[in-house]
Amino acid sequence: TLASKSLVFTVRRQPPELIAPAEPTPHELKLLSDIDDQESLRFQIPFIQFYRNNPSMGMGGRDPVMVIREAIARTLVFYYPFAGRLREGPARKLMVDCTGEGVMFIEANADVTLDQFGDALQPPFPCLEELLFDVPGSGAILNCPLLLIQVINSLLPNCLPAPHNTNVYTLPPPHPYPSKINPPSLHTIHV
């Protein structure tokens, strides 16, 4: 669990950017299957994954954010529909317009470590809305990037924080949920 006192942390974000495929990709329309084109599936799903920095992974001192940014661009060459936009055709049929515009990417720094969250690193994660940035105008299904990827670094003594968008959060200790009761959805969690 979180420490018995409040956890205060700051998240600093760079402005959002689009990462396009590293090489030219086909410009074509791809119709979604009838299974993927159900009206009830037209929503976005936010999720968060945690990875600890492992210096022994052989990155040779490279900036993890730069490695991820380059990997996304190279991956989009092969998975180029993700760099496109959903469009609506006749009879509201969804299709991916493979434009090569790119996916949305945000670099952020936080002055908190994973260890400071304690056992809270499992659903429902109490700080999802504080850590993930909802880019204004990107929440629609049509004509928006299909993926929004945010990479959050813990601030290190040699790192300069991004001055653009700063939010400071104070989190009181969580209220434990009995295991037999379903916790509220992520949108209603107050810690």
Image (tube, grey):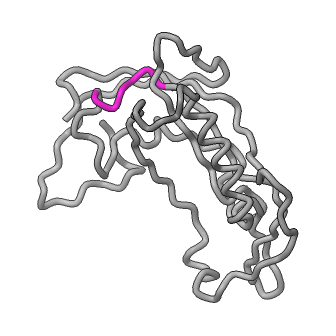
The residue shown at (82%, 76%) is 29
* Residue 86 as seen in the image, left or right of residue 130: right
In this view, the residue farthest toward the top is 157
Using the image as rendered, state which of residue 144 and residue 55 is in the foreground.
55
Query: Does the magenta run of residues contain 181?
Result: no
Res 125 quadrant in image: top left
The residue shown at (63%, 38%) is 106
Res 30 quadrant in image: bottom right
Using the image as rendered, state which of residue 29 and residue 41 is in the foreground.
29
Q: In the displayed structure, would residue 92 be above or below residue 123?
A: below
The residue shown at (78%, 87%) is 91
* Residue 176 as seen in the image, left or right of residue 117: left
Q: In the displayed structure, would residue 34 be above or below residue 78?
A: below
Q: Position of residue 78 (x, y in %)?
A: 70, 64
Q: Position of residue 53 (x, y in %)?
A: 41, 33
Task: Say which quadrant the N terminus sits in.
Answer: top left
* Residue 148 as seen in the image, left or right of residue 132: right
Query: Does the magenta run of residues contain 112?
Result: yes
Q: Which residues are magenta?
A: 110-115
The residue shown at (69%, 81%) is 32
Q: Position of residue 169 (x, y in %)?
A: 43, 25
Task: Say which quadrant the C terminus sits in.
Answer: top left
Q: Position of residue 101 (x, y in %)?
A: 81, 54
